[in-house]
């Protein structure tokens, strides 16, 4: 998938820049049927870098659909985390909130503008009482961030899902990756030394891709 992006930008070092964690070795018995669908997960928090990562994911999804006729879904994940600065003191984007929110999944929604109107998944995998106990400002900020991701999805007119998670960033991202059988996780990071990449570890279930340094050039 990244080869097409590398060719379009005209850089022969793009893959080397962007792949922060390689794809793990897959068993030979992997179900071939699942390869017909592709899931691209994006860690999104409305920061410029994460917005770039989401845009890249949509571009790759669009090109992959054109080239392979496969079903490609981009999924944005926003994680509300406790004591963010303590875990990732050098992370450039402020994601800390004043009140602890326990790990749980709040909502999932679907958008598919390419074939059907906007679809909202009716079942919310959440304890509604727990969500109601959260600070209003926290939930409003989360809603704003998810809305931004959805707006970008509408521009690309592709298949899209959004996840709002509560807990540790690395743990929740891994949960969604495993739940959705993701092919790639996109993050707004430019280096393997980024604290989040270090926390994900080397035994991550899919490849982790960042944004290239050449975007700033």
Image: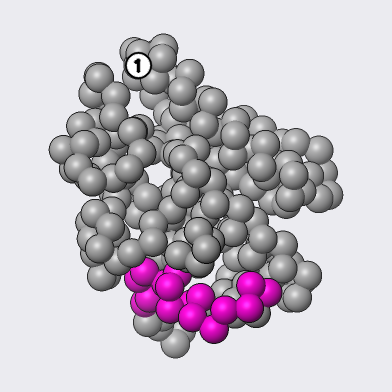
Quarter placement of the N terminus: bottom right
Q: Is residue 55 above or below residue 208?
A: above
Q: Is residue 12 above or below residue 98?
A: below
Q: Identify residue for label 1.
A: 134
Task: Give neighbour class at mark 1: few <14, some 14-19, many 20+ (Cα, 10 Å).
Answer: some
Camera-nearest residue between 106 and 9: 9
Regarding residue 146, the answer to whether it shows in the image is yes
- Horizontally, is 80 left or right of 159 in the view? left
Region in magenta: 8-24
Pinpoint residue 47: horizontal percent, then vertical percent.
46, 40
Q: Residue at x 64, y 38 (%)?
A: 150
14 is within the stretch colored magenta: yes
**Hey, which residue is sitting farthest left in the picture?**
86
Q: Residue at x 43, y 53 (%)?
A: 188
Pinpoint residue 197: horizontal percent, then vertical percent.
29, 60
Regarding residue 36, the answer to whether it shows in the image is no
Q: Residue at x 75, y 75 (%)?
A: 67
**Hey, which residue is sitting farthest front in the picture?**
217
Camera-nearest residue between 49 and 78: 49
- Horizontally, is 129 left or right of 53 in the view? left
**Hey, which residue is sitting farthest bottom in the picture?**
28
In what element is the residue under mark 1?
Answer: loop
């Amino acid at each position: 998938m990244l080869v097409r992006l590398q060719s379009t930008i005209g850089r022969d070092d793009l893959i080397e820049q962007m792949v922060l964690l390689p794809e793990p070795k897959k068993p030979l018995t992997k179900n071939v049927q699942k390869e017909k669908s592709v899931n691209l997960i994006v860690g999104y928090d409305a920061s410029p870098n994460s917005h770039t990562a989401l845009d890249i994911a949509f571009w790759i999804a669009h090109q992959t659909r054109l080239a392979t006729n496969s079903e490609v879904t981009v999924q944005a994940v926003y994680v509300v985390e406790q004591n963010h600065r303590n875990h990732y003191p050098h992370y450039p984007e402020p994601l800390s909130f004043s009140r602890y929110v326990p790990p749980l999944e709040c909502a999932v929604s679907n958008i598919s503008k390419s074939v059907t109107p906007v679809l909202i998944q009716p079942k919310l995998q959440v304890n509604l009482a727990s969500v109601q106990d959260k600070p209003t400002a926290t939930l409003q900020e989360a809603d704003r961030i998810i809305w931004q991701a959805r707006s970008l999805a509408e521009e690309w007119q592709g298949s899209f899902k959004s996840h709002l998670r509560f807990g540790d960033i690395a743990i929740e991202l891994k949960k969604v990756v495993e739940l959705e059988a993701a092919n790639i996780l996109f993050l707004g990071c430019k280096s393997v030394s980024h604290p989040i990449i270090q926390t994900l570890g080397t035994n991550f279930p899919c490849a982790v891709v960042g944004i290239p340094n050449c975007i700033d050039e």
